[in-house]
Amino acid sequence: MSANESFQAFRIHADRDNYRAGVEEMRIEDLSPGEVVVKVAYSSVNFKDALAGTGKGKILRNSPLNGGIDAAGYVVASSDAAFREGDQVLVTGCGLSETRDGGYAQYARLESKWTIPLPSGLTLRESMILGTAGFTAALSLYRMLQNGQVPSMGPIVVTGATGGVGSLAIDILTRAGFEAHAISGKLEHFDDLIALGAKQCISRKDLYWGQRPLETSRWAGAIDNVGGEMLAGLTRVIHPYGNIASCGLAAAPELATTVMPFILRGLSVLGIASAGTARDIRDAVWQHLANDWKPAHLARIATREVGLDGLPEVFERMLAGGSFGRSVVRL
């Protein structure tokens, strides 16, 4: 494709007094700079994408930008010898749809330092069913293992379990030999969570943590997508020397707790910042996702596939809490 030919992109304009987003025509020369030009095959929809694409969250640091924090496709040109025409690659996070053009476009120009060769064991579509959500779930487990979490300590509970990170976390934990439990307010999806590997499903509405700084411990660890009162409650009920991976704030960013779980039970709360993960860790996590941690139910988790023009509806449904699993964007 020549620099003067046009292609379609879902472009977000987030100026101080004006917000608009939609499908536009643009050219490769208009894309953010980078060493690797990719013909995008698939992207995905994450909570951050919905916030950016509707203007309901201040995600973009530059404007305008193409949306989409994930991208996977074929290299069509590269000034870095590490990548050749036809190579299959992926990128998640790393400034996409924040400081540079993202994956909601038929072409993307990427920085080679963050461009990952597609691992053997994954297709491009599978890599985007995973996307940032799967990478975040796997990074949570990776950090927990680094900090001493092992299956023999007991079950790991996942909050916000019907979302993208949550549903993939259930499957990934099960593949890695852990017993996974699920917390969700969507009782209608409990059968789906059990099919993904959850051994126990708990209604968010039935939870009562107790008010003491330490309550009877129930789980060996947690992957928390919710924050707020949920995360505070979890700190009181995790077994000694367990880990909570904090990777989301779907309910609230605040955390009201005491130091008691940390100094009496040795609890660790691990911050999961997937967007800026170092390259060596990023490579290691993707190798796990393509091999021993590859979810067994990707087809079930991918509940929707849309084109660029279908994005606004997906954004609104996600922000309204009506989505389950993952939405794949087909370019």
Image (cartoon, grey):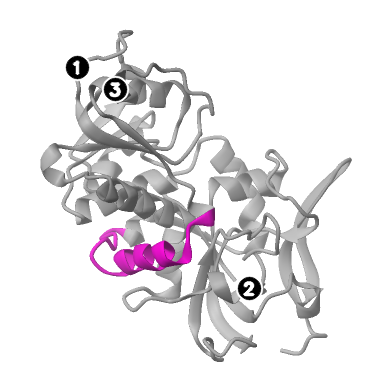
Q: Is residue 153 magenta?
A: no
Rounded to the nearest angstrom, the CA distance separating label 3 from label 1 is 16 Å
Q: Quarter of the image containing the C terminus?
A: bottom right
Q: Is residue 310 visible?
A: yes
Q: Quarter of the image containing the N terminus?
A: bottom right
Q: Residue at x 30, y 10 (%)?
A: 210
Q: Secondary structure at mark 3?
A: helix
Q: Earlier in the sequence, mark 1 or mark 2?
A: 2
Q: Is residue 314 visible?
A: no
Quadrant in the rendering for residue 283: bottom left
Residue 151 x, y percent position in the rendering = 15, 45
Q: Secondary structure at mark 2?
A: strand
Please, what is the three-letter code of the amino acid marked with disc 1?
Thr
**Disc 1: which residue:** 216
Q: Earlier in the sequence, mark 3 or mark 1?
A: 1
**Disc 2: which residue:** 110
Q: Is residue 313 above or below residue 87?
A: above
Q: Residue at x 80, y 71 (%)?
A: 25
**Disc 3: which residue:** 263
Circles 3 and 1, Cβ within 8 Å, touching? The answer is no
Which one is nearer the viewer's eye here, 230 or 188?
A: 230
| Chain part drawn in magenta | 276-297
Q: Secondary structure at mark 1?
A: loop
Rounded to the nearest angstrom, the CA distance separating label 3 from label 2 is 45 Å
Residues packed near mark 2 inside 10 Å, few (<14), some (14 to 19) or many (20 plus)? many
Q: Residue at x 37, y 76 (%)?
A: 119
Q: Is residue 283 magenta?
A: yes
Q: Is residue 43 above or below residue 262?
A: below
